[in-house]
Amino acid sequence: MAMSNKTIDWLNIGLMILSLGLAFLLPFELFLFSYAVLGPLHYLTEIGWLHKRDYFLPDQKAAKLFLPSIVVLGILLVWSAFGAEWLPNFHGLSLGGWGANIILGSLLLAGLLVFIKSPVQRAVAAGLIGIFLLVFQIERPATVVRIEGKEVARTMEWKENPYILVRGMQVQRENGNVEPEFGVLFRRGFDGLNPVEYTLVKSGFALTPPKGCSVANASGFVIPYGKSPEISFEGSLTQFALFVAVFLPTLVHVFLFTGLFMAFGAIKSKSKPGWLSVILLLLCGLLPFIWFPSIHMGEISSYIEESYRSSFFEVNRQVLRWFGALKGGDQASADVAVFRSTLGVGLMRFIAFAYTYHYLNWFSKTSLIQWHKMPKPTLLAIGLIWIASLMLYAFSYKTGLKALFLLSFLHVFLEFPLNFASIKGLTGALSASFIRKSK
């Protein structure tokens, strides 16, 4: 017997409070458990549910076009993430650095299929989007250059140039004369497209940039003669690239889109508990950042730390960098900020809550999943794949992540039309309500 919408709303409120409580007690452990145990089952059941509803696209033609396109894009994303690792001799064909383009392409494809109904207009829009994404690489390495702690230059590049030359500085002699065009050449290493390591090569006047060198102009910065300037770097991706590649398929997907879907359901059903759950979701998301109780979590085990470092560590690091809580770009500083700082633990509580509740919220909707109506072969296939995924995660968390990488992103990509439909329906309902009240 299916539960009523109001009963489900009250159940969701209980699950929300439960998720938040566990997140405050065991943030890292809860996330790793939820992502490995609940995540794969969520992917499998939601993809099937979306497929039966033609992915919430306006017509079946769009659905038939959407599924194979997303599968191809998902495979390309896997290749961009692991191609260089699997086939190092074919590094040039790995698509490394094009992951954000692929994710954005999936989002834009879903949007044009939802909002554009004419086949001709769809084809034209898809062509223009394709040309843009093939020409302009979103994931571009950027480097902030600081001398004596003062920002003097920024670079924006298209690829992983192995060298960076900081030039244009002036050296002031003891007699007061100033000599221009002093430069310092560094060799750098990369983590993907993110510059992470800088090694001094040489310094001097009027240095010629070697092949594969980026140039940062620190024009006007004066260095006293005989003093070696303290030059530091902070490598990162652009904010837009970070949003698309890091945040859109993770925190935006599990928190913002979940909230929009809940709000759309509440406004359709006119459910007060539904609106209460939306408000409570926002409060639960805010609480880890404003309340830091002295709960003794104990020392994080090396297994938990290594497992998390192989999964979502970069998400935490980038958020903390935005908050200004990450001091230094080395791994040790990042570890302290993510695993042991007050804000780092608060952020982890938010992430653990968002993911755990995202999964539990889905499984509470038994009227949507309809386990009892699933054919036995489908249930058996889901069960076997789920058990296999649990075994992979148990063997090695990193292995489980790689094995489930395609499935996890497919479920995000295939949900994009539903996200657009929720936004469209929510804005339409709110606009209609505003018009009625204004008359």
Image: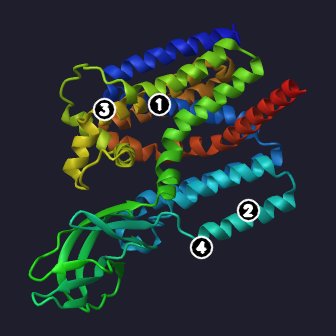
Front residue of this view, candidates 169 and 414: 169
**Residue 343 location (% of width, % of height):** 31, 35
Q: Secondary structure at mark 3?
A: helix
**Residue 43 location (% of width, % of height):** 55, 35
Number of numbered labels in the structure image: 4
Q: Dot 1 corresponds to which residue?
A: 355
Residue at image coords 35%, 67%:
143
Which amino acid lies under the numbered mark 1 shown in the image of this protein? Tyr
Front residue of this view, candidates 16 and 42: 16
Q: Real-space Cα distance between discs 1 and 3?
A: 15 Å
Which amino acid lies under the numbered mark 2 shown in the image of this protein? Ala
Q: Dot 4 corresponds to which residue?
A: 135
Task: Name above or below for residue 172 compared with residue 243.
Answer: below
Is residue 431 shown left or right of residue 330? right
Is residue 128 shown left or right of residue 388? right
* Mark 4 burial class by Cα count in 10 Å: few <14, some 14-19, many 20+: few
**Residue 101 location (% of width, % of height):** 56, 61
Residue at image coords 68%, 10%:
6
* Mark 2 burial class by Cα count in 10 Å: few <14, some 14-19, many 20+: some
Is residue 240 shown left or right of residue 47? left
Q: Dot 3 corresponds to which residue?
A: 345
Q: Earlier in the sequence, mark 1 or mark 3?
A: 3
Q: Secondary structure at mark 1?
A: helix
Residue furthest to the front: 176
Which label sits on residue 126? 2
Q: Secondary structure at mark 4?
A: helix
Quadrant for residue 339, please give it: top left
Q: Real-space Cα distance between discs 3 and 4?
A: 40 Å
Task: Name above or below for residue 157 compared with residue 391.
Answer: below
Q: Are marks 3 and 4 in contact (CB under 8 Å)?
A: no
**Residue 226 location (% of width, % of height):** 8, 81
Quadrant for residue 264, please give it: top right
